[in-house]
Amino acid sequence: MTSDPVATDFDPALKLARFLPRTVITRRTAGLLRRLTSLGALVPPKGGEAVRCDENVSLRVFRPNAPDNLRPGVLFIHGGGYLIGSAAMGDGMCRRVAAQVGAVAASVEYRLAPQHPYPTPLEDCYSALLWLAEQHDVDSSRIAVVGESAGGGLAAALTLLAKERGEVLPAFQVLSYPMLDDRTSSRTDLDESRFRVWSPRSNRYGWSAYLGSAISDVPPLAAPARYEDLTGLPPTWIGVGTNDLFYDEDVAYAKRLIDAGVPCTLFEVQGAYHGFDQIEARSALARNYRGEQLRALAAGLANQSN
C-alpha cells in the first residue's frame, strides 16, 4: 500500500509535531533510553500492586475498588520498539481501565531486545496472560489484550499464539499503532518528512534487535503481518495516525482481519504522528483517541458476557 497524500500535514492540535525529531531510538541511544525508561519500575504502582508472575516476569496490577465475584481482565503491553520501556508505562491506562471498565488490569514487564530477542518477549507476555486468567477475580473468558507500538505487535502475536495453544483465548484486542511488519524496514517509497519519533532508521534497528538470528527467516509469530491464517481471532480495534510509519501496515492488517471474518474497527487519526497520544496527552486529539480506546474495550468485553 502507498501512503495517503492527503495526510502529509500534521493536525493543528499537535503543536509539538514541528519540533520533534524524526528519530529517537537508535543503536547509540537505546542503552541510555532503556535505563531512563526503566526508572518507572522502581516506583510502586499508585493504586495497584507489583507481583511476580514467575522468576522472569512481573506485572503491575490494578483492581476496581468495588468488589465483585468475577470481572473481565485486561493485559497491557507497553511499547518501545522491543528495545526500551517498562510496565510502569501502562499505569495510567490500567488505572483508567480498572476505574472505567471495571476490569482487573495488569501491565507486563517483559524482557527486552537485543539481550532477549524473539521469542522471549512474546513468551513473557504469554506467561502474564496465563497468570491473569488464573486469578480468582478474573473471568478467563473475558480477557482483552492491549498494546501500544511494539506492545501492539506483541499483543497481536499473543492472540495468535493463544489461538495456536488453545489454553486461554482472548476475547478482544486493542492494538494502538502496532508494530506488525518487519518488511516496512526495507521500503524505499516513504516520505520520511511525515514521521516523528519513530523513523525507518529506528524501525530497522528495532526489528533487527528483536528478530536476532531469525532475521533471515522471520517466523510469522514474530511479525504478525506475515501470519497467513487470521481466522478465529477475537474482535479487534486498531488505532493509528496517518503520519505514522506503521500506518500502511496497520491498515493492511485491519483489512486482512475483516477479510478473514474477524470484526475489526480501524480508527484513523488524520495528521497524527507515532505516539502522539503519549507525547501530547493533553491535546483534544489525544483525549478523544484514549476515549475511543476505552469505549471499544468496554463494549468488546461487555459483548462477551451476553
Image: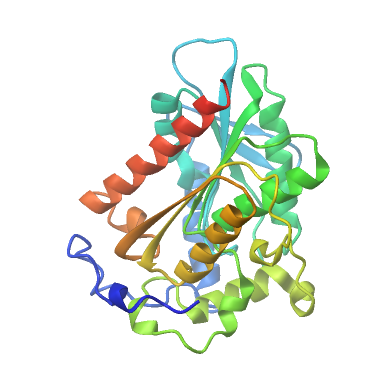
Residue 292 placement: quadrant = top left
> Residue visible at 60% across and 43% down?
108
Q: How is the image coloured?
A: rainbow
Q: Quadrant of the C terminus?
A: top right
Does 95 sit above or below residue 137?
below
Does 291 sit above or below residue 141?
below
The image shows residue 64 at horizontal and vertical percentages of: 46, 20
| Residue 6 in the figure: left or right of residue 52 | left
> Residue visible at 39% across and 60% down?
275
| Residue 28 in the figure: left or right of residue 294 | right
Q: Residue furthest bottom?
A: 188
The image shows residue 10 at horizontal and vertical percentages of: 25, 70
The image shows residue 80 at horizontal and vertical percentages of: 52, 61
| Residue 198 in the figure: left or right of residue 231 | left
Does 153 sit above or below residue 200?
above
- Residue 56 seen from this side: no
Count up the numbered dots. Answer: 0
> Residue visible at 53% across and 62% down?
34
Q: Residue furthest right?
A: 165
> Residue visible at 59% across and 10% down?
69
Residue 252 placement: quadrant = bottom right
| Residue 197 in the figure: left or right of residue 140 | left
> In the depicted view, which residue is nearer to us: 203 or 47?
203
The image shows residue 48 at horizontal and vertical percentages of: 49, 28
Does 248 sit above or below residue 152?
below
> In the depicted view, which residue is nearer to us: 100 or 124?
100
